[in-house]
Amino acid sequence: MGASLYEPINVYKPVVPNIGIVDGPFEYLTVGGARLPLPFTTRMTVVRLSNGDLFLHSPIKFEGRLANELLGLGAIRHLVSPNQFHYAHIGEWAKAFPNAISWASPRVRERARARHVDVDFTRDLETRPPEEWRREIDQTLFPGGYFKEFIFFHKASNTLILADTILNIELDKITEPWRTATKFTGVPSLWSDFLWHAAAAIAPAAEGEDGN
């Protein structure tokens, strides 16, 4: 069995009030400019803010019909790169919506330049959320050396919004021989260990921080 998508793709799927997801087409890993035969699924999260603006977390490949559907929910205003690996399609959305703000995560500008991806980030994410959404969405920078990700928390629905901080690896979505390699290398177990140690490291700091 080959890899499969989370059909239907390019369609807004409500999850809780004012939050939904959109599953996108396959993407492929590239190393040294060569595309590996390892497709992976894509997904973005859409949050509608109280003023009607839309917050697009990890935008997937731009598609006109999808954009029109989202415009029925609100104004596309925030294009968010949560980490340096989730940015490739922000430029496409920014061209279609020039008044939108493109938010940069750590090292994402350097990565985009190295891969000749056309994207112009207008503002940087910081540890504390910006005025545009701080009353509704909290955020912090999850530590991890080379890997750093901004994670978000939608207050009204108690929804945590992540990209790669937690991976849900479904083996039936992976083609062979990668499925067998994933199973025997213990990738899910490695991530569980990583998250346990990371949570233990940041817990004392979190206890000492004041809320917004």
Image: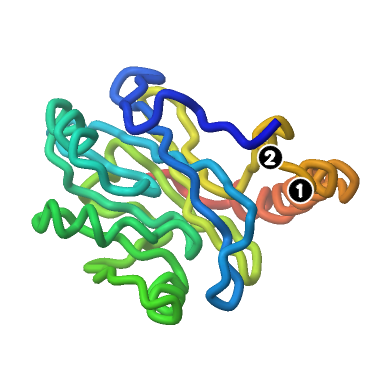
Q: Could you tell me which residue is drawn at 30 percent across and 60 percent down?
A: 103
Which picture quadrant has residue 168?
A: top right
Q: Nearer the viewer, residue 36 or 77?
A: 36
Q: Nearer the viewer, residue 39 or 168?
A: 39
In the image, taking residue 182 as reference, residue 142 lies left or right, namely: left
Which picture quadrant has residue 56?
A: top left
- Which image quadrant: the C terminus? top left
Q: Secondary structure at mark 2?
A: loop
Q: Could you tell me which residue is drawn at 43 percent across and 79 percent down?
A: 110
Name the residue carrying label 1.
178
In the image, taking residue 52 as reference, residue 197 lies left or right, namely: right
The vertical placement of 49 against 129, above or below, is above
- Give the amino acid type for the residue marked by disc 2 in the picture: Ile
Name the residue carrying label 2.
174
The vertical placement of 3 against 93, above or below, is above
- Which image quadrant: the N terminus? top right
Q: Secondary structure at mark 1?
A: helix
Density class for disc 2 (Cα within 10 Å; few <14, some 14-19, many ≥20) is: many
- The image position of residue 195, as x and y in percent, is 73, 47
In the image, taking residue 12 as reference, residue 162 lies left or right, namely: right
Are the residues at dot 2 and dot 1 in contact (C-beta closer than 8 Å)? yes
Q: Nearer the viewer, residue 83 or 22?
A: 22
Q: How much space separates mark 2 and mark 1, taking CA atoms?
A: 6 Å
Q: How many numbered markers are drawn?
A: 2
- The image position of residue 113, as x and y in percent, is 38, 80
Q: Could you tell me which residue is drawn at 18 percent across and 28 percent down?
A: 69
Residue 52: assigned label: none
